[in-house]
Image (cartoon, rainbow, N blue to C red):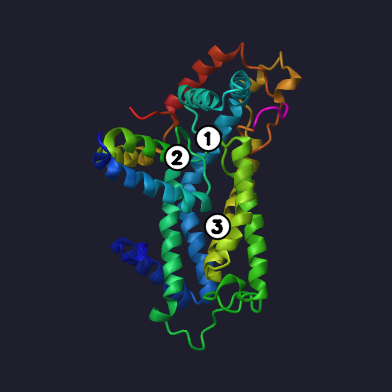
Amino acid sequence: MNAVMRLPSKLGIGLIWAYRLTFGALFPTTCKYHPSCSEYAVQALRKHGLVKGSVLAGWRLLRCNPWSHGGFDPVR
Amino acid sequence: MILYSIPIFSQLEAVMRDLLKFFHTNVGLTWAWAIVATTVLVRLILVPLTIRQIHSMQSLQRHAPQMKEIQKKYKGDKQKQNEELMKFYRENHINPAASCLPMLLQIPVFISLYYTLKYFTHHFETAGQDLSWLHPIIPNILNHTTSSWGGYLLLVVYVASQMASTLFMAATADKTQRILFMIMPLFFVFVIAHFPAGLVLYWVTTNLWTVGQGLITRRLVARTPTPAPERRSSRTSPKDDGTSGNGASPEGPSPKPAPSAAQQQPRQVRRKKKRTSRR
């Protein structure tokens, strides 16, 4: 992918960092998954671009609920 | 500012405003206590999640020795250690306490309260209203926290409650992460000082709720009859239940010395699987 194509996902990753530095820090929590949800989101955006990456990250967030089991769950 | 232009946040603010108004006019609380009541309501809604957490903690405690084993095995490699631990959770159907979704659900509450307090005077008649909390500690919940001496007191309580709630949270956090979480409020105090006192009040309330919940949970976990693995601890090696690990389960002290489970692992795992599948 060239730099222009990667721009949207870069923006998304920027937003994740904004979250990490603000609310992620204000409401500290540990994730039951590895990699953590925000790390997963960054990796998903890098690998699959903004649209598919966001969908994957959103789905992961929904899975990160008290009824799920957590565990090792890398971006595929 | 940016967030407020997104329609959903202004709608959320309207919901928050109605909630506060309900507690103020219908229940007859002062505005400050209405904030406390709203916070308690939010946390009450989240209680079902807490019940799940109690189960998770019990399960975590049962598997603590095996997890320590893993931590010891991959001592040098944090990444690998984490991965192996997570795999272990999955294989044994352990559900570590913290998950991202409930935490994220609290962010909209926080943001809507922030905007409600920020634009409070646009929507409510404040002249002659009692906006204090435990007068004279906080004379006005809309003002910056540091605008009164009581605000500093509130900030101290905030830091203490935030640290305490960190102790009861983050079951899977490793030592460095937990220390980081403990130190963070000391830095955030400077940001929070510029928030309306009402928002800090929300924060302190929710933290204290977490602490109370943690204390009750601890009690419950400690009182639970210890299941099979604990009873078969004939070959307990005393060094195993020490503090060498990074506290995979900070909640609740283990009531009995934990067995060194390496040799018993296969049998235990099978057992646990059966248990969890029935639930």
Q: Which residue is mark 3?
A: B206
Q: Chain of mark 3?
A: B
Horizontally, residue B19 falls left or right of residue B133, namely left
The subunit letter for the residue under badge 2 reads A
- Pointers 2 and 1 in contact (CB under 8 A)? yes
Q: Disc 3 or disc 1, which is closer to the eye? A: 3
Please name the residue that numbered disc 2 is placed on: A66
Are tags 3 and 1 found on a single chain? yes
**Image side of residue B205 versus residue A33, left or right:** right
Q: Amino acid at mark 1?
A: Ser
* Residue A76 position in % (x across, y down): 33, 27
In the rendered image, residue B190, in percent from the top left (x then y), is placed at: 59, 62
Circle nearer the N terminus (3, 1): 1
How far is mark 3 from mark 1, CA to CA? Answer: 21 Å
Q: Amino acid at mark 2?
A: Pro
Secondary structure, mark 1, is: helix
Q: Main secondary structure of the magenta part?
A: loop
Residue B78, quarter of picture:
top right
Q: Residues within 10 Å of mark 2 (few under 14, many from 20)?
A: many
Q: Position of residue B118 (x, y in %)?
A: 45, 73
Which chain hosts label 1?
B
Q: Are marks 2 and 3 on the same chain?
A: no
Residue B153 is labelled as none
Distance between the alpha carbons at the discs numbered 2 and 1: 9 Å
Magenta extent: B242-246
In the image, residue B244 lies in the stretch drawn in magenta: yes
What amino acid is labelled 3 in the image?
Answer: Thr
Q: Position of residue B176 (x, y in %)?
A: 62, 38
Which residue is tagged 1?
B56
